[in-house]
């Protein structure tokens, strides 16, 4: 155990799996960085440095740079997965799903079903997501609801370095296609991470904050924001909140959420994806169906507006839900003026 | 750029099918490499082509009965392409296919009974009824699947080729796709990726001159061979109605890929006998064009003429194959029709290996 | 006014707009059918015959067949839309969005926002959706939640020939990108359709069935199925149901839904898209937030399972919700044993 | 296939930049068509290139202050390409651009102040602060937008060209994209579509030899010119550090497209001075390579040497341009820094023209 960054945790998990299983290969644009160029051959280790050093340890047969052709290399990873490799592919920005979506949702996701259960597709697609870095509309989206919508895909969103490593190893060992999303603002986050190998099962939430009065559900970077809101609610308003981080959107740990809602009767889902047909809507509707009679107040969703991500910091600052907004939402669930919520 | 084989007519190249009347023995016995096809292989080739043809012709009839769910796309007319190519492959080699995939599957060794049952939507089908005509896959026989998405296959083949290369299986991977799919961006990207990664991959563009109702005269700019070989891939264009031409070019192509030299491109030209799908009235092609292709571009007739003319096989032997195949298809249809449908409890199984 | 099929209604609406506005052009694969071939030059009029006859009336400068390159021609339509044309593009099967998703969600949908409101993108993308025709996993999806998720897009799903024509004309005149989805089983549906031109505004639900006891929300072909359920509920169980067809998922007529839920207190959303982050979840969560205190029972979603569309008719039959399933769901909202719903 | 212009060196082709020392007056005064560039145009060309260079160099410094949000990709080194091309265009012509779009925007006439403000995220920006560096667009000046998606532009250009053709505006549409984007499927599809629809389109591949940290030596199979012209498009490859070579080839290209003959392809080769983005340490390129390109492949130095050597303009005139440009950029930065940020109320406006 030692303190490691989110980035290091991922790198370590990946290397350990590559050592353990020669079928694990890394594929993506600039995953080494420098292929064919005159300088350092491992100059980038991926656009966010996650795969740095893998070239030195494993060589070019295990880590493959690609041309800028996402359909070809994501599709190739899918084809490799059904024929015996276990590729870990890097999509750089999840926003780029648009240029390779077919290979993900109509090919990789559906092989097993279309082929009558006679194949498996052990494919991991890593991508960064999230607003807050001034990257504007085409490099800041969350988009995990799009993957969550598609049967056949699993979707993972780690919120800590510890989870990142354990969930990545689980993803690599999983026999289904897994979309693994990393918030681009979290790579330097530090946390305790075991040196050895370990896995965290999919569909099991973590509960980083416990309280009896209300529940907040959040993924990825929103977990930290939700925790901050929970702290303030406790200190300033004496409202004790449970924060649930389901860690995977698909499969979803419905039981932990339902149990907490039954216990607390009040729930806010704080999510950074677009609101319409989004993650917050998904979880809200699940609760509205399965824990209805335990609800003491409306299920609130705190999300960005139905709007692309703006560039200007003065706008972007208000895009991803702030702790204050979550705090206000939870507080409002205790107001007498319930009808005035909208 | 392309090696000197590009556009090379080859020993049994496209120019030769017209000559079938005046064949001499040497023309058939020996291909460009001076290799003679053993009698058994000749029979196998004929049998595979006949299997595909009979399968497809019969399906056209079955579709008319209204008992075949969904849409089927028939490969009749193009049998020599799948057959000539796949005879060089074994189960460790992978192919990707298209919406028009029956011929490729049969040539790759996927079982007829399972295929027919699949197309009828039965529990005994290759994919247990879940995939249907457009998704027949059989990984055990190296069949990566028909594909409902035009251009869906070439990227997958890059991956299967990467597996072969990385795990040094000795296998290769080969993509069949149409002239329509040739334009799709995924195909272009795959050519480039296969070259960049130097993959043991073969790309076979099966050019029937049409994508649905649109002619490639209209839809495809420039020249197929020029466009493919501009990636630095060697390639050959052959008459896809001439089994020998295809078989010969495919040997070169597959040997090239297998020996680690990187990808190879094949262009096979052969007509699509039916409309785009079984039931398509095919009004966009003139009666003359359709008549002419059935008369003059029938790979089975051409094959028969060649081997009979050269005295390699006798008509009786070939007729016996026809009869055997007819029986196989009859039995497959009967079995498929008698087979149970998948149980409703199967609706949501097989989505994942494991789901929480 | 005369009886017309869904297909005829669309064709008529399209032609009327093409006559009215020379900037309207039709783009897609086989939208004439026969380009460059030896036979009939208007042999198909699109894979489902919707654009048949347009070639004869308007010529090849107004209706453009394309190679099978959806990214190029959908992207071209987007580029044409911001420079002065009003393209109506046909994507054939909505499942094919995978090969051109970037041009839809990152280009067309975002131009106006990214460019600071200084442009408009009058683009219509028509596509067929839906299961029930034995077309298997890659040709049967609904997928409108994917578009609904994306800010900048409007999404239309007509349920009658009348609506099809009025909504299509509205879509063509609209200055934003519109995804226009046609259920492939409905083209031969007949209905009264005015001969002249008319529009139906987006974001205004129709209410084809009125009742005081419960509400069913449904789109497209599910509207008919919901109506059948409503009829049976009235006849067999004396339950009077309101059926709401919002007609557009984005914008969504929240008011009509909320008003009905407040009136009836019970609601089922019957939808044919995948359930996770789906349309039913979206509407359910909106209700759980905005009409919570009027609900007398859980909000139920009746959707296909989290599974691709199967090929075999014996399976597919159970895929899209049947009237009986909706009926049972509505009935269950009146059961004493509310807690036993799940 | 390609016409005889393919690979043709052209009057001021790539072979000539090395000769700049030994220039004679005739070399510069007249291009291949025997046309002399008016003095005013020479100044304009220099001024545009200098504007771009100064804009980018200054931005590199501003990024270092930490006050520029997000990521900017600098075009320095490639100025002659955008400039030589866009001088043939007017506001009715459209261009699409890339993540590295400042140079294209400036050359197309987009206002410097608005651009700088946009990059700083200010309400006075070209896109009112909502787009930023990677989304600068200005339809009034025919700028369809920078683009954050590699390969995003070529399809859009097909559309703008279709508008020009359908409405007979007399305009053309032109796509700038990199050697990396050249591989993207959308680019290949656009070549084909432009040929099939015979569009007044020009495709300009700006080849700086690298896509992010990966060399096109590795990532791009075959030959760019062969791959593009295999679609039947005519094309030319020119030295992108030589304004005159670009300007000359672009005239041919744009005239071809404008006259209704269909699309044309240009390949301009010029180095990217900075790393992929401002702040990228650029370790994947050797110090020698980076030194050499700044020393030997500076389009501004090359231009100066040519026009001075030929006695067409004097150094004072050019220095005056430099001074004027420095002032413009200073003022733009000062104005941008002083400008208000967009108000929070703008967060969700401009998503739709109208929404219910
Ligand atoms: C991405 C995509 N676009 C369109 C279609 C519809 N479609 C199915 S087959 C076909 C024609 C394909 O032509 P070609 O590749 O030449 O194959 P052929 O049918 O001639 O065998 C089309 C357009 C599809 N299935 N997928
Ligand atoms: C679809 C997509 N894939 C990857 C990226 C990340 N990316 C941004 S620029 C770039 C390199 C582009 O190279 P090139 O086209 O040669 O342009 P250059 O940067 O050299 O000007 C990459 C990979 C992206 N923006 N979009
Ligand atoms: Mg074809
Ligand atoms: Mg480049």
Image: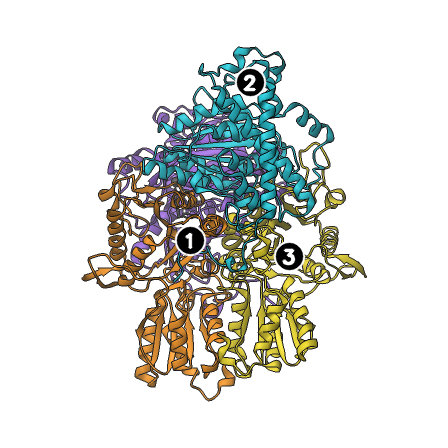
Chain colours: A yellow, B purple, C orange, D cyan
Q: Position of residue A142 (x, y in %)?
A: 57, 58
Find out if the beta carbon at label 1 lies less than 8 Å from the nearest ligand 1 atom. Answer: no
Residue A246: percent from the left, percent from the top? 63, 68
Q: Dot 1 surroundings within 10 Å: few (below 14), some, or many (20 or more)?
A: many
- Dot 1: element: helix
Q: Residues within 10 Å of mark 2 (few under 14, many from 20)?
A: some
Taking D268 as reference, is C132 above or below it? below
Q: Are marks 2 and 3 on the same chain?
A: no
Circle 3 residue: A183
Residue A247 appears in the picture as rendered: yes
Labels 3 & 1 near each other (Cβ < 8 A): no
Whether pointer 1 and pointer 2 mark residues with C-beta atoms closer than 8 Å, the reply is: no
Query: Which residue is more in the foreground, C120 or A57?
Result: C120
Which residue is tagged 1?
B133
Residue D313: image tag:
2
**Subunit that carries the residue with mark 3:** A
Looking at this view, is B138 or A96 the one in front?
A: A96
- Tell me the CA gap for discs 1 and 2: 72 Å
Parent chain of label 1? B
Tag 3's secondary structure? strand
User: B203 and A196: which one is in front?
Assistant: A196
Q: Real-space Cα distance between discs 2 and 3?
A: 54 Å
């Amino acid at each position: 155990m030692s303190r490691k960054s989110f980035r290091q945790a991922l790198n370590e998990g990946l290397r350990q799996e590559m050592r353990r299983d020669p079928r694990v290969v890394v594929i993506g644009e600039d995953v080494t960085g420098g292929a064919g160029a005159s300088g350092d051959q491992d100059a980038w280790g991926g656009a966010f440095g996650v795969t740095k050093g893998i070239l030195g340890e494993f060589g070019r047969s295990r880590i493959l740079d690609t041309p800028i052709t996402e359909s070809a290399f994501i599709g190739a990873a899918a084809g490799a997965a059904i024929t015996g490799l276990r590729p870990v592919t890097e999509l750089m920005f999840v926003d780029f799903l648009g240029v390779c979506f077919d290979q993900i949702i109509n090919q990789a996701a559906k092989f097993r079903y279309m082929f009558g259960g006679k194949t498996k597709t052990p494919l991991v697609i890593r991508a960064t997501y999230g607003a807050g870095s001034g990257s504007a509309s085409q490099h800041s989206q969350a988009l995990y609801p799009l993957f969550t919508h598609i049967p056949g895909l699993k979707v993972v969103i780690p919120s800590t370095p510890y989870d990142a490593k354990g969930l990545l190893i689980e993803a690599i060992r999983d026999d289904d296609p897994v979309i693994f999303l990393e918030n681009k603002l979290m790579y330097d986050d530090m946390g305790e991470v075991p040196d050895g190998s370990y896995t965290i099962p999919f569909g099991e939430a973590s509960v980083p904050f416990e309280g009896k009065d209300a529940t907040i559900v959040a993924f990825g970077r929103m977990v930290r924001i939700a925790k901050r809101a929970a702290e303030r609610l406790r200190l300033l308003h004496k409202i004790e909140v449970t924060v649930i981080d389901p860690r995977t959107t698909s499969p979803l740990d419905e039981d932990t959420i339902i149990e907490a809602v039954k216990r607390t009767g009040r729930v806010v889902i704080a999510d950074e994806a677009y609101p319409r047909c989004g993650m917050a809507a998904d979880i809200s509707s699940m609760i509205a169906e399965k824990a209805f009679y335990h609800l003491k107040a409306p299920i609130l969703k705190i999300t960005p507006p139905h709007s692309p991500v703006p560039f200007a910091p003065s706008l972007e600052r208000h895009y991803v839900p702030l702790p204050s907004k979550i705090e206000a939402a939870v507080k409002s669930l205790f107001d007498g003026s319930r009808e005035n919520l909208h | 750029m392309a090696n000197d084989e590009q556009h090379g007519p080859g020993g049994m190249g496209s120019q030769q099918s017209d000559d079938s009347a005046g064949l001499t023995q040497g023309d058939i016995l020996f291909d460009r490499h001076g290799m003679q096809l053993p009698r058994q292989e000749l029979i196998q080739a004929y049998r595979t082509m006949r299997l595909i043809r009979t399968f497809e012709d019969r399906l056209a009839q079955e579709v008319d009965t209204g008992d075949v769910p969904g849409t089927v796309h028939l490969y009749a007319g193009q049998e020599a392409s799948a057959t000539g190519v796949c005879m060089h492959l074994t189960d460790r080699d992978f192919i990707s296919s298209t919406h028009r995939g029956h011929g490729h599957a049969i040539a790759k060794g996927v079982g007829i009974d399972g295929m027919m049952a699949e197309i009828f939507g039965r529990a005994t089908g290759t994919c247990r009824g879940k995939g249907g005509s457009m998704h027949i896959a059989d990984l055990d026989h190296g069949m990566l699947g028909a594909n409902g998405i035009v251009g869906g296959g070439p990227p997958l083949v890059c991956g299967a080729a990467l597996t072969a290369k990385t795990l040094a299986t000795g296998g290769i991977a080969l993509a069949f796709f149409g002239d329509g799919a040739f334009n799709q961006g995924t195909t272009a990207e795959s050519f480039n990726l296969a070259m960049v990664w130097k993959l043991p991959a073969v790309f076979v563009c099966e050019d029937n001159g049409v994508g649905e109702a649109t002619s490639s005269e209209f839809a495809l700019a420039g020249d197929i061979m020029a466009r493919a070989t501009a990636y630095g891939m060697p390639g050959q264009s052959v008459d896809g109605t001439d089994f020998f031409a295809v078989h010969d070019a495919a040997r070169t192509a597959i040997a090239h890929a297998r020996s680690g030299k990187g990808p190879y491109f094949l262009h096979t030209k052969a007509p699509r006998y039916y409309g785009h799908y079984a039931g398509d009235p095919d009004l966009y092609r003139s009666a003359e064009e359709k008549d002419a292709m059935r008369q003059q571009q029938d790979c089975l007739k051409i094959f028969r003429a060649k081997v009979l003319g050269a005295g390699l096989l006798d008509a009786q032997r070939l007729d016996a194959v026809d009869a055997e195949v007819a029986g196989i298809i009859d039995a497959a249809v009967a079995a498929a029709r008698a087979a149970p449908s998948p149980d409703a409890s199967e609706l949501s199984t097989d989505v994942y290996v494991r789901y929480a």
